[in-house]
Image (cartoon, grey):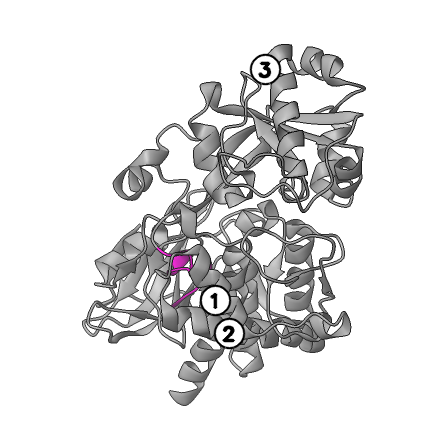
Amino acid sequence: MSVLSASGVEFDLQVPVLVVGAGACGLTAALAAAEQGAEVLVLERDAKPSGSTSLSSGLIPAAGTRWQAALQVEDSPSLFASDIQGKAHGKANPELVEQMTTQVGPTLEWLADAHGLVFELLQGFLYPGHSVLRMHAVPEHTGSALLQRLLNATRQQSIDLLTEATVSDLYVDNAQHVRGVRVSRPDGSSELVGCRALVLACNGYGGNPGLLERFIPELAGMDYFGHTGNQGEAILWGEALGAELRDMGAFQGHGSVAHPHGVLITWALMMEGGIQVNLQGERFSNEHQGYSEQSVSVFAQPEHLAWNLYDKRLHQLGMAFDDYCNAESMGAILQAGDESELARITGLPEDSLRQTLEQVQRFQKGASPDPFGRDFTKKPALQPPYYAVRVTCALFHTQGGLAVNEQARVLRPDGSPLPNLFAGGGAAQGVSGPAVWGYLSGNGLLTAVTLGRLAGSSAGRLVLASN
């Protein structure tokens, strides 16, 4: 993962726009660059594109969309921006926040109208920190389905995608123009691919223990649920080119991954009335603070484990999500007729568990306040039969990265852009501020698709202008 001199280098082939990474960001960038009339090649290290997009729930928050209007949901980019900053304690980059919140809606409508993606507005509950319903998803409600639809769109546009192609080195000239890359293949061979614009869409550094130790040392020992290919190449290349790094301590974690099954359990269960208890049968946090912060709370518990406890109403809600259905088919979801059976099947101390459930009943009736600050009065009380799933915490992806401007061009510390380098998604600074508490649900795919479109459009215009 080096930056080398392009002096005297002869490339095996030349492509106007080169995109590194075939996740939501990279494929959206490719579609946008091709729309400008530029030839595009997407390079993907895996045999089959997956990455962080496939591991996500596939939900993209957007404000002021036609899908919201159809359901009479009143929203605006300014309200969305306020929610982002509220979650980030006002520490998210305001220019980037404004750009993302104003551009994501048009980006989704462009993907629908120009490329046939089908979106719907997720109904029934609000994710932590969102004022209104604004989570958009493809009908399957999974990240893998979103990625497959983007792949289908690139095929329809005859965009070239080269898999099992790992970018190992960048070649730059004396003016810091990226002139091309070295692509390494599984058989040990390599080829040199020249370009006139490079889009880094290769996600963050969650899979690189060295970079995690450098930027987020408090995560040492937490399970990593992201894609192992997220090795931080964009960070290392950007640093070598003198780019600015921003908000490197930010990340998205999750406090609800079925253990040991490794399946994401939707946080809607908590938002609609469920609770989490530790191995002593005691609650330990405000479950409504957000699933990202909850990763840290669960990490602090014995054995880094917790139990999600809920009832049949919430179990039925969970069955609307493919991941939850998968967890049930794997035997992760347990059912109990009463508190005694719940204690027996979970191994939780019955006295402590019973006391916790009684406390929650009092909170729900408004008889006493929750010491963790959660308002239980707005959701129905839990009723037997009870359901339970053992969960752990995990790091999903990092949220800090290369500084970019409104065209997704990578910036130096003085604010000047590098000549032909663009970044989006996990490779770029996000809108979650500097730490875990700033992650608003959906922030990852928000910047992936929006910066992806901006990066691809800008790269396409750049190369066409230079013809």
Residue 14 locus on image (x, y percent): 42, 71
The residue lying at 67 percent from left, 67 percent from top is 153
> For this rendering, which residue is in front, 126 or 24?
126
Indicate the secondary structure of the residue bearing disc 2: helix
Tag 2–tag 1 contact (CB < 8 Å): yes
In terms of sequence position, does the residue under pointer 2 or pointer 3 come before the other? 2
The single residue placed furthest to the front in the displayed view is 367
At label 1, the amino acid type is Ser
At label 3, the amino acid type is Ser
Q: Is residue 94 above or below residue 254?
A: below
User: Magenta segment range?
Assistant: 422-433
Residue on which disc 3 sits = 352
Q: Quadrant of residue 370?
A: top right
**103 within the magenta span:** no
Residue 415 locus on image (x, y percent): 24, 73
In terms of sequence position, does the residue under pointer 1 or pointer 3 come before the other? 1
At label 2, the amino acid type is Ser
Q: CA distance from mark 2 to mark 3?
A: 45 Å
Q: Is residue 155 left or right of residue 433?
A: right
Q: Is residue 396 above or below residue 102?
A: above
Image mark for residue 78: 2
**How many labels were placed on the picture?**
3
Tag 2–tag 3 contact (CB < 8 Å): no
Label 3 neighbourhood size at 10 Å, few (<14), some (14-19), many (20+)?
Answer: some
Residue 257 locus on image (x, y percent): 58, 33
Tag 1–tag 3 contact (CB < 8 Å): no
Residue 89 locus on image (x, y percent): 38, 57
Image mark for residue 377: none
Q: CA distance from mark 1 to mark 3?
A: 40 Å
Residue on which disc 1 sits = 82
Can residue 264 be seen from the camera position used here? no
